[in-house]
Amino acid sequence: MKPVVRVAVAVVVVAAAIGAGVAIGAARGGDEPAPTSTPTPSASAQPSSGGLVAGGGGSGKAADGKTPIRFASSCDGAAQAAAAYSVGLTDEIGYARPGVAGTKRAGLNATLDYIFSTGGSPDESVVERRTVLLTPNETLPGLTAHPEWGGYKVVDCVPKFSATINLFSCLTGYPDSDGGSICDTTVWELTWYADDWHVARIPATTVTPDPTSVFPDSVKAPNPVPAASRRAALAAGGAGWTEWANAPK
């Protein structure tokens, strides 16, 4: 299977898993409860705290009125853009939920236009992600990304040119509940274009070591992820991972 196909399939699989009751307490019924054990990182492996706010940094909003845009041209700005776009590319009201038919949030199409604008032909990975988000859906629940529950790693960056950011983040279904969350690590390739960071590619790349390896079952991670578990996950990911300033304490 091509990497770009895996990206789109992963989004659908995640949504399907939540819709099936894996991550939502109300839908899980008699399922086993989410693991409650909390890994403890060693004192020498504590992740750093960069002082960046997940969801902050943008000086404007996209057409949906909620996704931050207009980030600083620095590597810090790229990291904050990746976090903001990871939320913008989920859609908590985009799918059916109890009593509400699946609809798309206002301004989503124009918001995607902006996020994926690079001045050239779009990569297949972003075309697939856009298709998944805009396709009408009446069966799967909405999704909400929580990058602040995880962390980020600047893999490569040249300010005002390009950046590769790894995000360890978690997804919950709509509405948030204590039923659990699905955590994963995603690579975001950004490019500087028209005075802002934009998503050039979302490669289906396996990050090794993966912070989510600390969870016995990454689709039944705690909700929200406790601070000790988050720090253990980031420590397991190796050097370079950083907590967000607004990570749950």
Image (tube, helix red, strand yellow):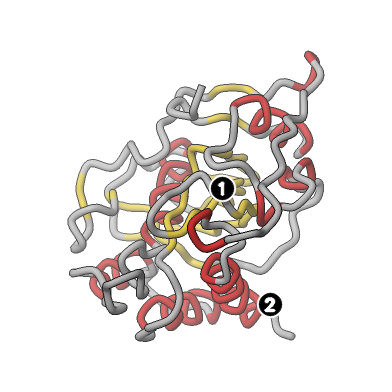
- Dot 2 alpha-carbon crowd within 10 angstroms: few under 14, some 14 to 19, many 20 or more: some
In this rendering, does residue 210 appear at all?
yes
What SS does tag 1 mark? Answer: strand
Position of 83 with respect to 13 (left or right) is left
Q: Amino acid at mark 1?
A: Ser
Q: Where does the image place residue 39, in percent across and percent down from the top left?
A: 77, 30
**In the rendering, which numbered label is found on residue 240?**
none
- Dot 1 alpha-carbon crowd within 10 angstroms: few under 14, some 14 to 19, many 20 or more: many
Q: Amino acid at mark 2?
A: Pro
- The residue at the point 36 percent across, 59 percent down is 88
Please state which of residues 201 and 172 is positioned toward the viewer in this rendering. 172
Position of 220 with respect to 41 (left or right) is left
What SS does tag 2 mark? Answer: helix
- The residue at the point 81 percent across, 46 percent down is 209
Give how far apart the Cα atoms at labels 1 and 2 are. 20 Å
Quadrant of the rendering where the N terminus is positioned: bottom right
Report the residue marked by disc 1: 169
In this rendering, does residue 192 appear at all?
no
Please state which of residues 171 and 98 is positioned toward the viewer in this rendering. 98
The residue most toward the top is 43
Q: Where does the image place residue 214, in percent across and percent down from the top left?
A: 78, 41
Report the residue marked by disc 2: 3
